[in-house]
Image (spheres, rainbow, N blue to C red):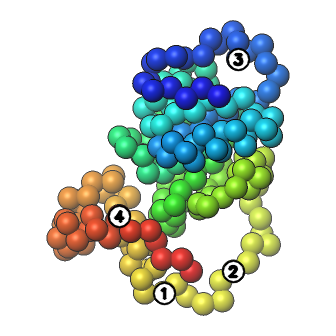
Amino acid sequence: MTDPQTATADLPDTAELGDNDQPTLLLADDDDVFRRVLARALERRGYLVTAAGSAEQAYALACHNPPEYAVVDLKMPGDSGLVLIEKLAALEAGTRIVMLTGYASIATAVEAIKLGATHYLAKPADADEIVAALQRTGGDASTPVADAPLSVDRLEWEHIQKVLAEHGGNVSATARALKMHRRTLQRKLGKKPVRE
C-alpha cells in the first residue's frame, strides 16, 4: 500500500504497477487509521491499493497512474471529495468511483453521481459493502421505499446541504442565503446528520 505524506513524494513506479494483474484502486480519506485499515482489507480482497490523505494527494497519484477504481471520502482538508470525483472522472472516464462519507445527504449523493461517481455509501461501511458497490453497474429497483417522511431535523440537514451545494460549498454565501449566522451554520455543518 502506498500512503504518501505529500502529493509528489514516494510516487510508485508506473512500470511496477503495470506489471501487476491486480486491479488498481485509489483510496482517499483523511482519517489515517480508517485509511490504513480499509486499504489492508481491500488488498486482502485482491486490489492493488494506493492511499492518500487528501484530494490533492490523491489527484497527484491518479495523474501518475490512473486507477481502475477509487474510494473517495467526502470531507477532507483542502478540496472536497466532490472536487476529486470530478477530476478523476475527467482524467479517466472508465474509473469506477465510490463516494464514502459520514456526512451523507441527498444533495451530496446527487452531486457525486452527476460528477462521475458510480455509487455512494454512508459510513460506516465495511470492505465487502465497498467492493460490492465498486462492482455494481446499475440501480436496484427493489430498494425499499421509506414508510415515513423525513424528520424535521433531517429535513433541515438536507436543505442546508442542498443550499450549500448550490453555492459551491461556500459557507458564507450559504449562511447569507439561509439568513443564518455563519457560526451557527458552521456548527450545524460540523454535526453528523440525523439518522433516519
Q: Residues within 10 Å of mark 2 (few under 14, many from 20)?
A: few
Q: Which residue is rendered at x = 58% and y = 53% of the image?
A: 100
The amino acid pointed to by label 1 is: Ser
Kindly indicate the quadrant of the structure image that contains residue 191. Answer: bottom left
The amino acid pointed to by label 4 is: Gly
Q: Which residue is rendered at x = 41% and y = 74% of the image?
A: 157
Q: Can see residue 196? A: yes
* Closer to the eye: label 2 or 4: 4
- Residue highlighted by disc 3: 17
* Closer to the eye: label 3 or 2: 3
Indicate which disc, 2 or 4, sits on the residue closer to the N terminus: 2
- Residue highlighted by disc 2: 145
Is residue 66 found left or right of 137 in the rendered image? left
How far is disc 3 from disc 2 in space, using C-alphas?
Answer: 43 Å
Q: Position of residue 87 (x, y in %)?
A: 49, 34
- Residue highlighted by disc 1: 151
